[in-house]
Amino acid sequence: MASSDIPILGTDDLLRPPQSEPEPQQRLEAEHTVTTTYTLKERTYQQQFSDIYFLRLAKLKPAVEEVAATTWDSVSVDRVLDVRQGEICWVTGTVYMDMPLKPNILDDISKDHWIAAPPARLKYTDSTNDQIMLEDESGRIRLCGGAIISEMLVTGCVISVMGSETVDGDFEVIDVAFPGLPPQILAKSPKVTKAEGGKYVAIVSGLKISGELHESFETHLLVEYLIGELTGPQDQSSASKITRLILAGNSLSDASPLSTTREDTTSKTKFKKYGYDSSAYNPLPITALDNLLSSLLSSIPVDLMPGDTDPANVSLPQQPIHPTMFPQSKAFLGSTFNSVTNPYECDIGGVNFVGTSGQTIDDIYKYVEGDDRLAMMERTLSWRHVAPTCPDTLWSYPFQNIDPFVLEKCPEVYFVGNQPRFETCLVEGSKGQRCRMVAVPKFAETGEVVLVDLETLGCEVVRICVEGPRRE
């Protein structure tokens, strides 16, 4: 949708003469089912991280080999070390990107020894020194050739490559195959045409609530819009069709220490007591978020996902933010308040949703050239994996029995929060799969709310601003 087509709600919408008393609005409801795909029942860190790669390859190898067998007529080999020089064949394995600019253990050692760490890199790419490897249980082989260099690849994706071994021992790639979109199980057949009177799901990310005295006025307008207290009857009627709100991560601002007085900064090091230190804890952000949620929950169901700035575990899958942190909102547990995981999967009104708070695509962005976030999202669907760079450069739990990030079925709506700007497109698979991809922008920077129509899978954006209506 073009930016000029985005409806804008602002203070000027409130300055209008009195009208006749509007008809009362009743919020529409949609059936909601949460899956436990990303829920950790117990956590132990005694196993190795390598197990997750073997699980991933064992799960995705049959799917990608099926695509390769129907596409190529050449002979396949079972292991990467079985390729022979001069013989055209194809082989399946897991990609490993050997990139000198990627983070390594030396960074952690430098922090332990109080050595100044280098600044975080926006990209890991270095066209002159990067190498692409393909590995399986037998070993690893280096890939070369224009066909593989032009592909968008990251560590952890499972692919098949066709080619032959060179005199240098490398594998020159002629063509590449991916697993493709997973099969899709539809509760109903979605239509892409625009329709009136549908039910919507609102997705918001990056509220960045700090709890300061002058908190963002757009955040308060957002609450009033969602509960139907903003502007006139037309917008209130539209708000009543929003069946659920998904807060896709980073609801709180980046953690910062409490301000210290001059006496504290000049005095000698004080005794550091063991355990909880109230002087180093700032309760304002979580209190402000609790107040915001309690205002919403009496009117609209809310699913709260954690992000990298929220009080949850850092490694994926992030577990739900503990309800005890919300003394007012926890009264709505079991009814309209759901603290959920990241990534998150659910069914709303018969439509399957899968989404993350943005860390997965942000990490893939560092591996590849360009900044096409939708292309990165589409590639994760083709790889059938939500977080392929786990656990190489994205922290992850060391799973031993299953890789939950593998997509067993194609979602109907795939969203990623905390992206630079709003983008959306419809992806269609070779077997009739249809998936609405949505890059959700940061609300604190754009003031944009994404609305997904459950009937048509159409996508709209409402922009909330203080200055009043403006066109961009």
Image (tube, helix red, strand yellow):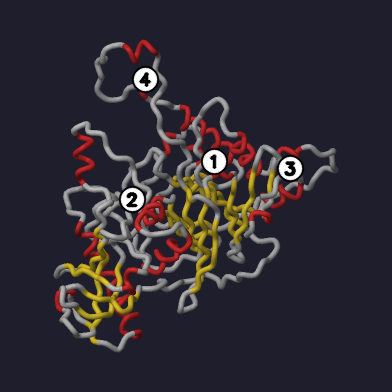
Left or right: where does residue 435 sit relative to residue 44? right
| Residue at 25 percent of width and 74 percent of height | 92
Label 1 SS: helix
Badge 4 vs badge 2, beta-carbon distance below 8 Å: no
Q: Residues within 10 Å of mark 4 (few under 14, many from 20)?
A: few
Q: Residues within 10 Å of mark 2 (few under 14, many from 20)?
A: many
**Foreground disc of the pair 3, 1:** 1
Given the image, on which type of amino acid does mark 2 rest? Leu
Using the image, determine if residue 449 lies above or below residue 453: above
Taking depth in this image into account, of 359 and 326 the one nearest to the observer is 359
Residue at x-position 71% and y-position 40%: 468
Q: Farthest bottom residue?
A: 73
- The residue indicated by pointer 3 is 231
Say which amino acid is labelled 3: Thr
Mark nearer the N terminus (4 vs 2): 4
Local secondary structure at mark 2? loop
Label 3 secondary element: loop
Q: Amino acid at mark 4?
A: Ser
**Which residue is more in the foreground, 137 or 328?**
137
Q: CA distance from mark 3 to mark 1?
A: 21 Å
Ranked by sequence position, the earlier of labels 4 and 1 is 4
Kindly identify which numbered label has been placed on residue 119.
none
Residue drawn at (65%, 61%) of the image: 198
- Among numbered discs 3 and 4, the one appearing first in the sequence: 3
Q: Are marks 3 and 4 in contact (CB under 8 Å)?
A: no
Residue linked to disc 1: 444
Residue at the (15%, 81%) spot, across then down: 84
Q: Give the CA distance from mark 3 to mark 2.
A: 40 Å
Q: Which residue is mark 4?
A: 279
Displayed quadrant of residue 377: bottom left
Report how far apart the C-alphas of labels 1 and 2 lie in the structure: 24 Å
* Corner quadrant of residue 19: top right
